[in-house]
Amino acid sequence: MNNKKYFFAVDLGATSGRTIIGSISEGKIEQEELTRFNNNLIETGGHVYWDIYALYSEIINGLKVAAKREIAVASIGIDTWGCDFLCVAADGAVLRNPLAYRDPHTMGVMEKYFDKAVDKQTVYSKTGIQFMNFNSLFQLYAMRENSNSALANADKILFIPDALSYMLTGNAICEYTVASTSQLLNPVTKDLDADLLSSLGIARDKFGKMTMPGTVIGTLTPEVQKITGLGAVPVVAVAGHDTASAVAAVPAANECFAYLSSGTWSLMGIETRNAIINARSSELNFTNEGGIDGTTRFLKNICGMWIYERCRKEFTDAPQSHADLQSEAMAQEPFKCLINPDDSAFANPPSMIGAIQDYCRTTGQYVPQGYAEIIRCVFDSLALRYRQVFTWLNEFADFPLDTLYIIGGGSLNNYLNQMTASSCGVIVKAGPQEATAIGNIMLQAKSAGDVSDIWDMRKIIANSVDQRVFEPQDKELWDEAYEAFLGVIKN
């Protein structure tokens, strides 16, 4: 290639993964996708697993491509989803593929844990993490209760990005941002909580050393060097949780912003120095996850484009292109009917269209007919739910929220971007779409000394991406719609 310094990013999602190379030149970031692959769940013996060896092989394949093209790989960083983990034996052997968060073994386990181990309020006061049945705390408790042989024989318990880094380097660490999703991390001490570990009968040394983003884990083992054709390339602990990497890529100039990481899930939050853990945050089920440079991501999960995508799969007569479908939806009468996107009815119904219609019927509203009315209902409702959460964020923030940055794949939806700006009454800046990969690359650049801190990173990102700006419109119309929305979701 040339004499540029290239950073190799591995970005793994729940359904697919990619390897990307990135570099910084003249104050801008450049990136190129090397490989893309599926991340397939394995269902066997009544359980659902991730194929850790397949993911490792895909990383190796990407590194081989880089070596073949003679790309000067300066370092490697891996980000993935949170909560899941791999058990490793004392001799370094992998003890079975890791259970996936979709595995049914945690159903009903939260309540048993609160009843027999540690009460719910104590868990939240220690961790500040929202309650989801697949959090690592409850996965580990379920495994212990089921006498899981992998856990019983584990010398190390490694979260997924740390497990893959271990397979590349032989060094076991516990990266801070992904550990923060586990409901085991205490954000005050910035380490795994001793009482919660004790409730599981697990010693702290079963996990690796707590490691902050930007730290070098080690170099590729001689075995991996031989397989790939690369040298002793450093592997860096980036923000191992993919949302943490995405938030690191928010191109803000100061702290006065909120973010919306928009995809299948929407994650709306703010960046703070300290965790926000109190009765109100508990009541509203906000979560405190680790960020970079000592920050906390105070956020709430919102059911995002999941409802839209599920409806698209059911439509038999709708346009195939997003642009055409959304254009027809926007031509419909607004606010004719509304739903709460986070109602349990929309978690995984047999028919999403039927669930929307049933919700509207049950709440005494107009029942939408046809794909255009249904999608209009979904977009109106999402924008109003964003307003509700944004209102709560203003309540918690001790600084003004002047701008809402929308990042991720959902940032391409200009209709919803404008609706969100109008609903929330705030300037929206959309992009970058590839926020997770950019954050991964920039943290490697920070580790290499090419950028100084988070604000230097964000300045480069802002110079590198085209941001689309949306200003609030039709305030009275949206104010009236919001009151109607609050009335509907209380029913």
Image (tube, grey):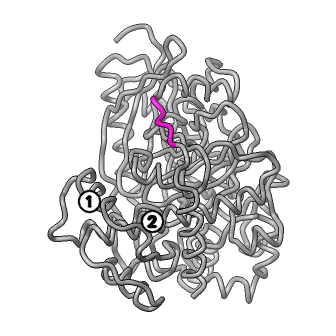
- Quarter of the image containing the C terminus? bottom right
Which residue appears at 41% of the width and 23% of the height? 230
Query: x%, y% of residue 390?
Result: 65, 58
Q: Is residue 175 above or below residue 115?
A: above
Among the 4 quarters of the image, the one containing residue 19: top left
Q: Quadrant of the N terminus?
A: top left
Work out whether residue 81 can be spotted.
yes
Residue found at x 58% / y 33%: 251
- Residue that carries the numbered disc 1 in the rendered image: 328
x and y percent of residue 277 in the render?
Answer: 81, 63
- Splitting the image into 4 quarters, where does residue 314 fall? bottom left
User: Is residue 88 visible to us here?
Assistant: no
Q: Residues within 10 Å of mark 1 (few under 14, many from 20)?
A: some
**Sequence-first tag of 2 and 1:** 1
The secondary structure making up most of the magenta span is strand
- Distance between the alpha carbons at the discs numbered 2 and 1: 14 Å
Left of 384 or right of it: where is 258?
right
Q: Is residue 73 magenta?
A: no
Q: Which residue is mark 2?
A: 380
Q: Reply above or below: 23 against 118.
A: above
Q: What residue span does the magenta drawing correspond to? A: 466-470
